[in-house]
Image (spheres, coloured by chain):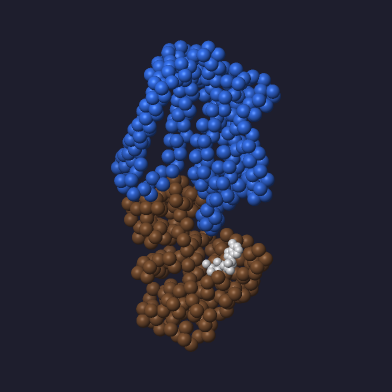
Chain colours: A brown, B blue
Amino acid sequence: MSALQLSGIGHAYLGRTVLDHIDLTVGAGEIVALVGPSGCGKSTLVHVAAGIVQPLRGRVSATYVRHGMVFQEPRLMPWATARDNIAYPLRLAGVSRKERRARAEDAAARSSLDVEDLDKFPIELSGGMRQRVAIARALANRPDFVYFDEPFTALDVALKRRMQDLVISAARDERFGALFVTHDLFEAVRIAHRIAVMERRGQGIAGERVIDGVPGAREDRQIFEIVMRYLGEDSLFHHVNDIDERRLP
Amino acid sequence: MTRAAAIVSKRLGRTGRFLWSSWSGLAAIFLFCVIWQIGHEAYGAFILPSPIAAIAAVLQLATQEANWQTALVTSRRALEGFALAALVGISAGIIAGYSAASIRLARPLVTLILGVPPIAWIVLAMIWFGSTDGMVVTTVAIAATPAAFIGAAEGIMTRDRGLDDMARAFGAGPWRRFSTLAVRHVAAYVFPALVLTLGTAFKVAVMAEVLSNSGGIGGGLARARSNLDVSEAMAWVLISVVALIAAEYGFVRPLHSELERWREAARPWGVRR
Ligand SMILES: Nc1ncnc2c1ncn2[C@@H]1O[C@H](COP(=O)(O)OP(=O)(O)O)[C@@H](O)[C@H]1O
Ligand SMILES: [Mg+2]
Protein backbone atom coordinates (compact mmCIF):
# COMPACT_ATOMS: atom_id res chain seq x y z
CA MET A 1 0.00 0.00 0.00
CA SER A 2 1.35 3.42 -0.90
CA ALA A 3 1.47 6.25 1.63
CA LEU A 4 2.20 8.97 -0.90
CA GLN A 5 1.58 9.08 -4.60
CA LEU A 6 2.66 11.96 -6.80
CA SER A 7 1.37 11.84 -10.35
CA GLY A 8 2.25 14.18 -13.20
CA ILE A 9 3.41 16.97 -10.90
CA GLY A 10 4.48 20.16 -12.64
CA HIS A 11 5.24 23.58 -11.25
CA ALA A 12 6.52 26.95 -12.42
CA TYR A 13 7.77 30.02 -10.59
CA LEU A 14 6.89 33.28 -12.35
CA GLY A 15 6.36 31.46 -15.63
CA ARG A 16 9.63 29.51 -15.44
CA THR A 17 8.96 25.77 -15.29
CA VAL A 18 11.03 24.13 -12.57
CA LEU A 19 9.21 20.78 -12.34
CA ASP A 20 7.36 18.65 -14.86
CA HIS A 21 6.03 15.11 -15.29
CA ILE A 22 7.06 13.94 -11.84
CA ASP A 23 5.69 10.53 -10.84
CA LEU A 24 6.80 9.12 -7.53
CA THR A 25 5.33 6.68 -5.04
CA VAL A 26 6.38 6.03 -1.46
CA GLY A 27 5.07 2.96 0.32
CA ALA A 28 3.85 2.89 3.93
CA GLY A 29 6.85 2.70 6.24
CA GLU A 30 9.22 3.02 3.30
CA ILE A 31 12.03 5.57 3.17
CA VAL A 32 12.73 6.95 -0.27
CA ALA A 33 15.75 9.16 -0.81
CA LEU A 34 15.36 11.81 -3.48
CA VAL A 35 18.67 12.89 -4.97
CA GLY A 36 19.60 15.30 -7.71
CA PRO A 37 21.90 18.25 -8.30
CA SER A 38 21.32 21.55 -6.57
CA GLY A 39 18.55 23.63 -8.09
CA CYS A 40 16.80 20.77 -9.92
CA GLY A 41 13.60 21.26 -7.96
CA LYS A 42 13.82 18.79 -5.06
CA SER A 43 12.68 21.31 -2.45
CA THR A 44 9.84 22.46 -4.66
CA LEU A 45 8.65 18.87 -5.06
CA VAL A 46 8.72 18.23 -1.30
CA HIS A 47 6.90 21.51 -0.65
CA VAL A 48 4.25 20.45 -3.15
CA ALA A 49 3.90 17.02 -1.54
CA ALA A 50 3.68 18.49 1.97
CA GLY A 51 0.97 20.93 0.89
CA ILE A 52 3.05 24.09 1.32
CA VAL A 53 2.99 24.87 -2.40
CA GLN A 54 0.00 24.35 -4.67
CA PRO A 55 1.27 22.62 -7.85
CA LEU A 56 0.31 23.95 -11.27
CA ARG A 57 -0.21 20.47 -12.68
CA GLY A 58 -0.62 16.96 -11.37
CA ARG A 59 -2.08 15.31 -8.32
CA VAL A 60 -0.84 14.57 -4.82
CA SER A 61 -2.61 11.71 -3.11
CA ALA A 62 -1.54 11.10 0.45
CA THR A 63 -3.09 8.21 2.35
CA TYR A 64 -1.01 8.63 5.49
CA VAL A 65 -2.75 10.09 8.55
CA ARG A 66 -0.45 13.05 9.19
CA HIS A 67 3.02 14.16 8.32
CA GLY A 68 5.88 15.99 9.97
CA MET A 69 8.63 17.93 8.27
CA VAL A 70 12.28 18.84 8.83
CA PHE A 71 13.81 21.63 6.75
CA GLN A 72 17.40 22.35 5.87
CA GLU A 73 17.44 25.18 8.42
CA PRO A 74 15.89 24.46 11.84
CA ARG A 75 13.14 27.10 11.30
CA LEU A 76 12.46 27.51 15.01
CA MET A 77 10.49 30.37 16.47
CA PRO A 78 13.20 32.53 18.11
CA TRP A 79 10.85 33.83 20.81
CA ALA A 80 9.75 30.38 22.00
CA THR A 81 11.69 27.91 24.15
CA ALA A 82 12.81 24.59 22.70
CA ARG A 83 9.89 22.96 24.50
CA ASP A 84 7.34 25.32 22.96
CA ASN A 85 8.92 24.90 19.54
CA ILE A 86 8.66 21.13 19.78
CA ALA A 87 5.06 21.43 20.94
CA TYR A 88 4.09 23.76 18.09
CA PRO A 89 2.44 21.10 15.87
CA LEU A 90 0.53 19.88 18.95
CA ARG A 91 -0.64 23.42 19.62
CA LEU A 92 -1.87 23.65 16.03
CA ALA A 93 -3.64 20.33 16.50
CA GLY A 94 -5.45 21.69 19.56
CA VAL A 95 -3.79 19.47 22.17
CA SER A 96 -4.23 20.76 25.75
CA ARG A 97 -1.34 22.66 27.33
CA LYS A 98 -0.63 20.00 29.91
CA GLU A 99 -0.56 17.14 27.45
CA ARG A 100 1.58 19.21 25.06
CA ARG A 101 4.20 19.49 27.75
CA ALA A 102 4.37 15.79 28.34
CA ARG A 103 4.38 14.88 24.67
CA ALA A 104 7.01 17.49 23.82
CA GLU A 105 9.27 16.06 26.52
CA ASP A 106 8.67 12.59 25.16
CA ALA A 107 9.59 13.69 21.61
CA ALA A 108 12.65 15.50 22.97
CA ALA A 109 13.80 12.33 24.69
CA ARG A 110 13.40 10.38 21.45
CA SER A 111 15.65 12.96 19.74
CA SER A 112 18.22 12.65 22.57
CA LEU A 113 17.64 16.18 23.87
CA ASP A 114 18.36 16.92 27.52
CA VAL A 115 15.44 18.04 29.64
CA GLU A 116 17.38 21.03 30.95
CA ASP A 117 17.85 22.31 27.39
CA LEU A 118 14.10 22.43 26.83
CA ASP A 119 13.71 25.74 28.65
CA LYS A 120 16.38 27.39 26.51
CA PHE A 121 15.66 29.62 23.57
CA PRO A 122 16.96 28.55 20.11
CA ILE A 123 19.57 31.32 20.24
CA GLU A 124 21.14 29.58 23.26
CA LEU A 125 21.50 26.23 21.47
CA SER A 126 24.19 25.00 19.08
CA GLY A 127 23.41 24.27 15.42
CA GLY A 128 23.19 20.54 16.05
CA MET A 129 20.90 21.01 19.04
CA ARG A 130 18.61 23.25 17.02
CA GLN A 131 18.30 20.62 14.33
CA ARG A 132 17.52 18.04 17.04
CA VAL A 133 14.75 20.33 18.24
CA ALA A 134 13.46 20.53 14.66
CA ILE A 135 13.46 16.72 14.45
CA ALA A 136 11.69 16.45 17.80
CA ARG A 137 9.09 18.92 16.53
CA ALA A 138 8.54 16.82 13.40
CA LEU A 139 8.04 13.71 15.55
CA ALA A 140 5.98 15.35 18.31
CA ASN A 141 2.59 14.62 16.82
CA ARG A 142 3.48 10.97 16.08
CA PRO A 143 3.39 11.31 12.29
CA ASP A 144 3.24 8.25 10.06
CA PHE A 145 5.10 10.12 7.34
CA VAL A 146 7.97 12.60 7.52
CA TYR A 147 9.42 14.93 4.88
CA PHE A 148 13.11 15.72 5.19
CA ASP A 149 14.53 18.47 2.97
CA GLU A 150 18.33 18.20 3.14
CA PRO A 151 18.14 18.37 6.94
CA PHE A 152 21.79 17.67 7.76
CA THR A 153 23.64 19.53 5.00
CA ALA A 154 24.80 22.27 7.36
CA LEU A 155 26.14 19.89 10.02
CA ASP A 156 29.67 18.51 10.38
CA VAL A 157 30.42 14.91 9.51
CA ALA A 158 30.31 13.34 12.99
CA LEU A 159 27.08 15.10 13.90
CA LYS A 160 25.58 14.18 10.55
CA ARG A 161 26.15 10.47 11.24
CA ARG A 162 24.51 10.66 14.63
CA MET A 163 21.53 12.50 13.18
CA GLN A 164 21.20 9.90 10.43
CA ASP A 165 21.23 7.14 13.04
CA LEU A 166 18.56 9.05 14.92
CA VAL A 167 16.32 9.14 11.85
CA ILE A 168 16.95 5.47 11.05
CA SER A 169 16.05 4.28 14.55
CA ALA A 170 13.07 6.63 14.85
CA ALA A 171 11.70 5.44 11.51
CA ARG A 172 12.09 1.83 12.60
CA ASP A 173 10.57 2.31 16.06
CA GLU A 174 7.66 4.47 15.00
CA ARG A 175 7.17 2.94 11.58
CA PHE A 176 6.93 6.15 9.62
CA GLY A 177 7.55 6.41 5.92
CA ALA A 178 9.69 9.24 4.64
CA LEU A 179 10.70 11.21 1.60
CA PHE A 180 14.27 12.21 2.32
CA VAL A 181 15.84 14.82 0.06
CA THR A 182 19.62 14.90 0.00
CA HIS A 183 22.40 15.44 -2.47
CA ASP A 184 24.74 13.23 -0.48
CA LEU A 185 24.69 9.70 -1.92
CA PHE A 186 26.28 8.24 1.22
CA GLU A 187 23.48 9.68 3.29
CA ALA A 188 20.89 8.37 0.83
CA VAL A 189 22.34 4.87 0.89
CA ARG A 190 22.60 4.80 4.69
CA ILE A 191 19.06 5.94 5.37
CA ALA A 192 16.79 4.77 2.57
CA HIS A 193 15.20 1.63 1.19
CA ARG A 194 15.11 3.10 -2.29
CA ILE A 195 16.72 5.98 -4.19
CA ALA A 196 14.91 8.13 -6.75
CA VAL A 197 17.08 10.31 -8.96
CA MET A 198 15.61 13.49 -10.29
CA GLU A 199 16.28 14.63 -13.84
CA ARG A 200 18.83 17.42 -13.95
CA ARG A 201 16.31 20.13 -14.79
CA GLY A 202 13.35 18.70 -12.90
CA GLN A 203 11.86 17.04 -16.02
CA GLY A 204 10.64 13.91 -14.28
CA ILE A 205 12.27 11.18 -12.23
CA ALA A 206 15.25 9.90 -14.22
CA GLY A 207 15.21 6.50 -12.52
CA GLU A 208 15.04 4.54 -9.28
CA ARG A 209 17.21 1.93 -7.54
CA VAL A 210 16.27 -0.32 -4.67
CA ILE A 211 19.22 -0.39 -2.26
CA ASP A 212 20.40 -3.81 -1.05
CA GLY A 213 19.78 -4.52 2.61
CA VAL A 214 17.79 -2.66 5.25
CA PRO A 215 18.49 0.85 6.62
CA GLY A 216 20.47 0.57 9.85
CA ALA A 217 21.72 -2.93 9.02
CA ARG A 218 24.15 -1.92 6.26
CA GLU A 219 27.77 -1.69 7.24
CA ASP A 220 30.02 1.21 6.32
CA ARG A 221 32.01 -0.94 3.91
CA GLN A 222 28.86 -2.05 2.16
CA ILE A 223 27.57 1.52 1.91
CA PHE A 224 30.87 2.65 0.46
CA GLU A 225 30.81 -0.12 -2.16
CA ILE A 226 27.24 0.63 -3.18
CA VAL A 227 28.00 4.33 -3.63
CA MET A 228 31.13 3.53 -5.61
CA ARG A 229 29.19 1.17 -7.84
CA TYR A 230 26.49 3.80 -8.43
CA LEU A 231 29.00 6.49 -9.27
CA GLY A 232 31.30 4.30 -11.35
CA GLU A 233 29.06 1.96 -13.30
CA ASP A 234 25.52 3.28 -13.15
CA SER A 235 24.76 5.94 -15.76
CA LEU A 236 21.69 7.03 -13.76
CA PHE A 237 23.98 8.73 -11.29
CA HIS A 238 26.18 10.51 -13.84
CA HIS A 239 24.69 13.92 -13.34
CA VAL A 240 24.59 13.78 -9.53
CA ASN A 241 28.28 13.09 -9.91
CA ASP A 242 29.21 16.75 -10.41
CA ILE A 243 27.89 17.53 -6.98
CA ASP A 244 28.96 14.44 -5.09
CA GLU A 245 32.51 14.21 -6.32
CA ARG A 246 33.56 16.72 -3.70
CA ARG A 247 32.02 14.62 -0.97
CA LEU A 248 33.99 11.46 -1.69
CA PRO A 249 36.39 10.57 1.12
CA MET B 1 7.84 23.58 42.82
CA THR B 2 11.45 24.12 41.77
CA ARG B 3 10.20 25.23 38.37
CA ALA B 4 8.02 27.90 39.97
CA ALA B 5 11.00 28.97 42.07
CA ALA B 6 13.17 29.22 38.97
CA ILE B 7 10.57 31.40 37.22
CA VAL B 8 10.27 33.63 40.28
CA SER B 9 14.04 34.01 40.59
CA LYS B 10 14.38 34.79 36.88
CA ARG B 11 11.71 37.44 37.17
CA LEU B 12 13.34 38.91 40.28
CA GLY B 13 16.60 39.03 38.36
CA ARG B 14 14.94 40.96 35.58
CA THR B 15 13.37 43.39 38.04
CA GLY B 16 16.76 43.85 39.66
CA ARG B 17 18.37 44.66 36.33
CA PHE B 18 15.57 47.09 35.61
CA LEU B 19 16.18 48.85 38.94
CA TRP B 20 19.90 48.89 38.28
CA SER B 21 19.38 50.45 34.86
CA SER B 22 17.18 53.10 36.48
CA TRP B 23 20.26 54.17 38.45
CA SER B 24 21.88 55.31 35.23
CA GLY B 25 18.63 57.09 34.39
CA LEU B 26 18.78 58.86 37.73
CA ALA B 27 22.38 59.91 37.07
CA ALA B 28 21.30 61.42 33.76
CA ILE B 29 18.51 63.36 35.49
CA PHE B 30 20.96 64.79 38.03
CA LEU B 31 23.35 65.79 35.26
CA PHE B 32 20.47 67.58 33.55
CA CYS B 33 19.66 69.38 36.82
CA VAL B 34 23.26 70.55 37.08
CA ILE B 35 23.14 72.11 33.61
CA TRP B 36 19.76 73.63 34.45
CA GLN B 37 21.19 75.13 37.65
CA ILE B 38 24.12 76.62 35.72
CA GLY B 39 21.67 78.18 33.27
CA HIS B 40 19.66 79.53 36.17
CA GLU B 41 22.72 81.15 37.74
CA ALA B 42 23.72 82.68 34.41
CA TYR B 43 20.33 84.16 33.42
CA GLY B 44 18.54 84.76 36.70
CA ALA B 45 15.33 83.46 38.25
CA PHE B 46 12.97 85.37 35.97
CA ILE B 47 14.14 83.70 32.74
CA LEU B 48 15.00 80.32 34.24
CA PRO B 49 13.99 79.48 37.79
CA SER B 50 16.27 77.02 39.59
CA PRO B 51 15.39 73.31 39.56
CA ILE B 52 14.69 73.52 43.30
CA ALA B 53 12.21 76.36 42.69
CA ALA B 54 10.52 74.41 39.91
CA ILE B 55 10.24 71.31 42.08
CA ALA B 56 8.90 73.44 44.91
CA ALA B 57 6.31 74.79 42.45
CA VAL B 58 5.39 71.22 41.47
CA LEU B 59 4.95 70.29 45.12
CA GLN B 60 2.91 73.45 45.61
CA LEU B 61 0.64 72.48 42.69
CA ALA B 62 0.45 68.92 44.01
CA THR B 63 -1.15 70.08 47.25
CA GLN B 64 -4.28 71.09 45.38
CA GLU B 65 -6.77 68.39 44.40
CA ALA B 66 -7.87 70.39 41.33
CA ASN B 67 -4.39 70.26 39.82
CA TRP B 68 -4.35 66.47 40.02
CA GLN B 69 -7.60 66.52 38.07
CA THR B 70 -5.96 68.80 35.50
CA ALA B 71 -3.04 66.42 35.01
CA LEU B 72 -5.42 63.47 34.81
CA VAL B 73 -7.50 65.22 32.15
CA THR B 74 -4.45 65.58 29.89
CA SER B 75 -3.27 62.03 30.58
CA ARG B 76 -6.73 60.70 29.80
CA ARG B 77 -6.90 62.63 26.53
CA ALA B 78 -3.40 61.57 25.53
CA LEU B 79 -4.08 57.92 26.39
CA GLU B 80 -7.44 57.93 24.59
CA GLY B 81 -5.84 59.40 21.49
CA PHE B 82 -2.96 56.94 21.86
CA ALA B 83 -5.32 53.97 22.15
CA LEU B 84 -7.28 55.14 19.12
CA ALA B 85 -4.06 55.68 17.14
CA ALA B 86 -2.71 52.28 18.17
CA LEU B 87 -5.97 50.53 17.26
CA VAL B 88 -6.41 52.22 13.89
CA GLY B 89 -2.70 52.35 13.01
CA ILE B 90 -1.94 48.73 13.90
CA SER B 91 -4.99 47.21 12.23
CA ALA B 92 -4.54 49.28 9.07
CA GLY B 93 -0.81 48.51 9.11
CA ILE B 94 -1.45 44.77 9.34
CA ILE B 95 -3.90 44.85 6.44
CA ALA B 96 -1.53 46.98 4.36
CA GLY B 97 1.41 44.71 5.20
CA TYR B 98 -0.36 41.70 3.73
CA SER B 99 -1.20 43.39 0.45
CA ALA B 100 1.62 44.82 -1.63
CA ALA B 101 -0.78 47.01 -3.63
CA SER B 102 -2.27 48.75 -0.60
CA ILE B 103 1.14 49.44 0.92
CA ARG B 104 2.20 51.15 -2.29
CA LEU B 105 -0.96 53.22 -2.04
CA ALA B 106 -0.55 53.92 1.66
CA ARG B 107 3.09 55.01 1.69
CA PRO B 108 2.64 58.41 0.00
CA LEU B 109 -0.45 58.93 2.13
CA VAL B 110 1.57 58.32 5.29
CA THR B 111 4.29 60.68 4.08
CA LEU B 112 1.58 63.26 3.48
CA ILE B 113 0.05 62.87 6.94
CA LEU B 114 3.50 62.92 8.57
CA GLY B 115 4.33 66.04 6.57
CA VAL B 116 1.45 68.03 8.04
CA PRO B 117 2.71 69.63 11.26
CA PRO B 118 0.64 68.68 14.34
CA ILE B 119 -0.09 72.36 14.87
CA ALA B 120 -2.01 72.42 11.58
CA TRP B 121 -4.14 69.47 12.74
CA ILE B 122 -4.85 71.35 15.93
CA VAL B 123 -6.11 74.37 14.03
CA LEU B 124 -8.20 72.21 11.70
CA ALA B 125 -9.64 70.19 14.59
CA MET B 126 -10.48 73.40 16.43
CA ILE B 127 -12.47 74.51 13.41
CA TRP B 128 -14.18 71.14 13.06
CA PHE B 129 -14.88 70.32 16.71
CA GLY B 130 -14.48 73.57 18.62
CA SER B 131 -12.49 73.63 21.86
CA THR B 132 -13.72 70.30 23.14
CA ASP B 133 -12.34 67.11 24.57
CA GLY B 134 -12.93 65.35 21.26
CA MET B 135 -10.83 67.90 19.46
CA VAL B 136 -7.77 67.15 21.60
CA VAL B 137 -8.25 63.39 21.33
CA THR B 138 -8.70 63.57 17.55
CA THR B 139 -5.59 65.66 17.09
CA VAL B 140 -3.58 63.26 19.20
CA ALA B 141 -4.92 60.27 17.28
CA ILE B 142 -4.16 61.79 13.87
CA ALA B 143 -0.64 62.80 14.89
CA ALA B 144 0.16 59.42 16.43
CA THR B 145 -1.38 56.98 13.93
CA PRO B 146 1.31 56.99 11.17
CA ALA B 147 4.08 55.63 13.43
CA ALA B 148 1.90 52.73 14.62
CA PHE B 149 0.81 52.08 11.04
CA ILE B 150 4.33 51.96 9.67
CA GLY B 151 5.54 49.74 12.53
CA ALA B 152 2.78 47.19 11.97
CA ALA B 153 3.12 47.20 8.17
CA GLU B 154 6.90 46.73 8.35
CA GLY B 155 6.42 43.92 10.84
CA ILE B 156 4.07 42.03 8.53
CA MET B 157 6.22 42.64 5.47
CA THR B 158 9.41 41.43 7.11
CA ARG B 159 7.90 38.32 8.69
CA ASP B 160 9.91 35.12 8.30
CA ARG B 161 8.53 33.26 5.25
CA GLY B 162 10.49 30.18 6.32
CA LEU B 163 8.50 30.02 9.55
CA ASP B 164 5.30 30.55 7.58
CA ASP B 165 6.13 27.54 5.38
CA MET B 166 7.00 25.52 8.47
CA ALA B 167 3.61 26.30 9.99
CA ARG B 168 1.90 25.46 6.71
CA ALA B 169 3.71 22.11 6.65
CA PHE B 170 2.22 21.35 10.08
CA GLY B 171 -1.24 22.24 8.84
CA ALA B 172 -1.67 25.86 10.00
CA GLY B 173 -4.21 27.90 8.05
CA PRO B 174 -3.91 31.65 7.45
CA TRP B 175 -5.48 32.61 10.78
CA ARG B 176 -3.24 30.31 12.84
CA ARG B 177 -0.17 31.53 10.99
CA PHE B 178 -1.19 35.06 11.81
CA SER B 179 -2.04 34.44 15.45
CA THR B 180 0.96 32.27 16.30
CA LEU B 181 3.72 33.76 14.12
CA ALA B 182 2.93 37.14 12.57
CA VAL B 183 1.58 38.67 15.79
CA ARG B 184 4.81 37.97 17.63
CA HIS B 185 6.91 39.33 14.83
CA VAL B 186 4.77 42.44 14.46
CA ALA B 187 4.96 43.10 18.21
CA ALA B 188 8.74 43.49 17.96
CA TYR B 189 8.24 46.23 15.39
CA VAL B 190 5.19 47.85 16.92
CA PHE B 191 6.43 48.37 20.47
CA PRO B 192 9.25 50.82 19.67
CA ALA B 193 6.76 52.60 17.43
CA LEU B 194 4.25 52.69 20.29
CA VAL B 195 6.79 54.28 22.64
CA LEU B 196 7.29 56.99 20.02
CA THR B 197 3.54 57.30 19.56
CA LEU B 198 2.94 57.69 23.27
CA GLY B 199 5.45 60.55 23.45
CA THR B 200 3.80 62.23 20.48
CA ALA B 201 0.40 61.76 22.13
CA PHE B 202 1.37 63.64 25.31
CA LYS B 203 3.16 66.41 23.46
CA VAL B 204 0.34 66.99 21.01
CA ALA B 205 -2.28 66.85 23.78
CA VAL B 206 -0.50 69.58 25.75
CA MET B 207 0.02 71.65 22.60
CA ALA B 208 -3.65 71.39 21.63
CA GLU B 209 -4.68 72.39 25.15
CA VAL B 210 -2.42 75.45 25.16
CA LEU B 211 -3.77 76.64 21.83
CA SER B 212 -7.43 75.93 22.39
CA ASN B 213 -7.51 76.78 26.08
CA SER B 214 -9.42 73.59 26.81
CA GLY B 215 -8.05 72.89 30.30
CA GLY B 216 -5.60 70.18 31.24
CA ILE B 217 -1.87 70.68 31.65
CA GLY B 218 -1.83 72.87 28.54
CA GLY B 219 -4.50 75.07 30.13
CA GLY B 220 -2.32 75.39 33.23
CA LEU B 221 0.64 76.34 31.07
CA ALA B 222 -1.39 78.97 29.24
CA ARG B 223 -2.50 80.44 32.58
CA ALA B 224 1.07 80.49 33.93
CA ARG B 225 2.16 82.26 30.77
CA SER B 226 -0.48 84.98 31.05
CA ASN B 227 0.50 85.51 34.71
CA LEU B 228 4.18 85.56 33.69
CA ASP B 229 4.73 82.89 36.37
CA VAL B 230 7.79 81.09 35.00
CA SER B 231 8.25 78.63 37.83
CA GLU B 232 4.64 77.51 37.52
CA ALA B 233 5.10 77.08 33.76
CA MET B 234 8.20 75.01 34.48
CA ALA B 235 6.24 73.01 37.01
CA TRP B 236 3.56 72.15 34.41
CA VAL B 237 6.25 71.09 31.95
CA LEU B 238 7.75 68.81 34.61
CA ILE B 239 4.34 67.38 35.39
CA SER B 240 3.65 66.53 31.73
CA VAL B 241 7.06 64.82 31.46
CA VAL B 242 6.40 62.83 34.62
CA ALA B 243 2.98 61.77 33.29
CA LEU B 244 4.57 60.57 30.06
CA ILE B 245 7.31 58.65 31.87
CA ALA B 246 4.73 57.06 34.18
CA ALA B 247 2.68 55.89 31.20
CA GLU B 248 5.71 54.60 29.32
CA TYR B 249 7.43 52.75 32.16
CA GLY B 250 4.23 51.65 33.84
CA PHE B 251 2.62 50.16 30.76
CA VAL B 252 4.38 49.96 27.40
CA ARG B 253 7.91 48.99 28.51
CA PRO B 254 7.01 46.14 30.89
CA LEU B 255 4.82 44.54 28.22
CA HIS B 256 7.60 44.90 25.69
CA SER B 257 10.29 43.36 27.88
CA GLU B 258 7.99 40.42 28.65
CA LEU B 259 7.63 39.74 24.91
CA GLU B 260 11.31 40.20 24.16
CA ARG B 261 12.58 37.88 26.91
CA TRP B 262 14.36 35.67 24.38
CA ARG B 263 16.61 38.51 23.21
CA GLU B 264 17.77 38.86 26.80
CA ALA B 265 18.82 35.21 26.63
CA ALA B 266 21.17 35.99 23.75
CA ARG B 267 23.25 38.40 25.79
CA PRO B 268 26.51 36.99 27.09
CA TRP B 269 27.00 37.21 30.85
CA GLY B 270 28.54 40.40 32.07
CA VAL B 271 27.65 42.85 29.34
CA ARG B 272 24.01 43.21 30.32
CA ARG B 273 23.49 46.96 30.25
N1 LIG C 1 10.01 30.94 -4.41
C1 LIG C 1 10.66 30.83 -5.59
N2 LIG C 1 10.49 31.76 -6.54
C2 LIG C 1 11.12 31.66 -7.74
N3 LIG C 1 11.96 30.67 -8.06
C3 LIG C 1 12.18 29.70 -7.15
C4 LIG C 1 11.55 29.74 -5.86
N4 LIG C 1 11.96 28.65 -5.16
C5 LIG C 1 12.80 27.98 -5.97
N5 LIG C 1 12.94 28.60 -7.16
C6 LIG C 1 13.76 28.13 -8.30
O1 LIG C 1 13.31 26.85 -8.63
C7 LIG C 1 14.38 26.00 -8.95
C8 LIG C 1 14.33 24.76 -8.07
O2 LIG C 1 14.59 25.14 -6.73
P1 LIG C 1 14.61 24.10 -5.54
O3 LIG C 1 13.33 23.34 -5.56
O4 LIG C 1 14.92 24.86 -4.31
O5 LIG C 1 15.81 23.15 -5.93
P2 LIG C 1 16.68 22.15 -5.02
O6 LIG C 1 15.97 21.98 -3.73
O7 LIG C 1 16.75 20.90 -5.81
O8 LIG C 1 18.02 22.76 -4.86
C9 LIG C 1 15.65 26.80 -8.74
O9 LIG C 1 16.12 27.20 -10.00
C10 LIG C 1 15.22 27.97 -7.93
O10 LIG C 1 15.96 29.11 -8.28
MG1 LIG D 1 16.59 22.51 -1.74
Regarding residue B163, the answer to whether it shows in the image is yes
- Residue B258 at what x, y percent from top left? 43, 40
Q: Is residue B202 above or below residue B222?
A: below
- Residue B251 at what x, y percent from top left? 46, 32
- Residue B31 at what x, y percent from top left? 37, 30
- Using residue B267 as the reference point, say whether residue B107 is left or right of it: right
Q: Quadrant of the C terminus of chain B?
A: top left
Give the image quarter of residue A45. bottom right
- Using residue A110 as the reference point, say whether residue B234 is left or right of it: right
Which residue sits furthest front?
Answer: B42
- The one nearer the camera, B217 or B86, is B217
Q: Quadrant of the N terminus of chain B?
A: top left
| Image-quarter location of ligand 1 | bottom right
- Using residue B226 as the reference point, say whether residue A111 is left or right of it: left
In the image, what residue occupies the spot 64% across and 34% down? B116
In the image, what residue occupies the spot 58% across and 51% down? B173
In the image, what residue occupies the spot 65% across and 68% down? A16
